[in-house]
Amino acid sequence: MEIEILDAKNSKPLGKCRVQGDTTIKALKNEVQNMKKSLTIHRQALRLEPRGKILKDSDTLQSLSISSGGKLYVKDLGPQISWKGVFLAEYAGPIFVYMIFYQRPSFIYGSAAANPVSLTANIAAICWVAHYAKRLLETLFVHRFSHATMPLRNLFKNCSYYWAFAGYVAYHVNHPLFTEPSTAVMYAGLAGFIVSELGNFSIHMLLRNLRPAGSTVRKIPKPDGNPLTQLFNFVSCPNYTYEFLSWLSFSMMTTCVPALLFTAAGMYQMTVWAIGKHKNYKKDFKDYPKGRKAILPFVI
């Protein structure tokens, strides 16, 4: 059968292609790329209507009730970059930025830069670097991305957020006039940070094992033998919960207001993501546990 491809922006026809009823949207994207070389498969979003829902790569023309003479609309998503590339850039930057301030350069802190570095500042630097080193290693060896690319503009947006906050927090924690909290508060925050980081890693490993390599299979995540994964009994996105608790503990450990602001900003964004994922879970799985919340047990 023959179907027509049109530009979603202005409804101008790009061309026609001959396909079968069992042709998938993913295969059709290759045909669209042949029509317009600059429109690579990762830049395409195919829709039934100009402003309609983006079709899944696994959908077939037959399942979408598209017959001969039918039309599909393609939106150009713009220049793309790999998810892994964005993650590596946004997580490597905070280590570099933070360590600049940790070295106490005189051009930032003046003559006071020679003052002794506090125990809390030393431990905070270790925690900060460990967190983002963990993120980098997870990006390389743990995460399995459901999409190959994202818009290039996200690289600048994400890096600006992480790098700017790294400088904001590091400037205050490493300041020569930084006042340490009590030893008990500092170690309590450190303990919370370590447990939360281990919990976050445990969730990422469980999610990795839930999706076979090279697939986009989705299953209901459930706790495994690791006690830190039991949080799945209460929330849909415990990785975000642990992430929030990590930075809340870091803020407690340093008693630093900029760190707390970073925690609040991150929590807001993760809550938005968690609510969206929670809704998708409930939509896709009819037997999804009803007692779960999105990110905070019994609350959100």
Image (cartoon, rainbow, N blue to C red):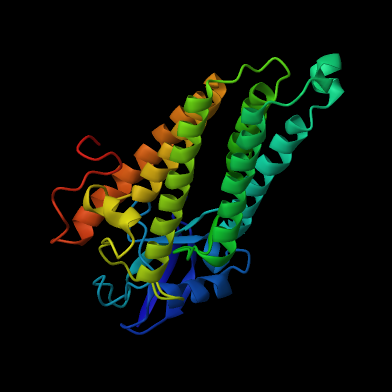
Query: Foreground residue, 292 or 78?
Result: 292
Residue 79 makes an appearance in the image: no
Q: Is 75 left, or right, of 239 in this rendering?
A: right
The percent position of residue 25, horizontal first and vertical second, equals 39, 72
- Residue nearest the observer in this picture, 155 or 249: 249
Q: Position of residue 255 (x, y in %)?
A: 52, 22
Q: Quadrant of residue 242?
A: top left
- Residue at the location (32% across, 70% down)? 70
Depicted 203 relative to depicted 92: above or below = below
Rendered location of residue 183, percent (x, y): 53, 25
> Residue at 41% of width from left, 58% of height from top?
202
Q: Quadrant of the N terminus?
A: bottom left
Q: Which quadrant of the view contains residue 270?
A: top left
Q: Quadrant of the C terminus?
A: top left
Rendered location of residue 28, percent (x, y): 44, 75
Q: Nearer the viewer, residue 58 or 177?
A: 177
Farthest front residue in view: 183
Residue at the image point whose x is 73% and y is 32% from the top: 102
Asked if residue 91 can be seen in this view, the reply is yes
Q: How many marks?
A: 0
With respect to residue 110, does 220 lie above or below? below
Position of residue 86 relative to residue 245, above or below, is below
Give the residue at x 28% y 50%. Answer: 231
276 versus 68 height, above or below? above
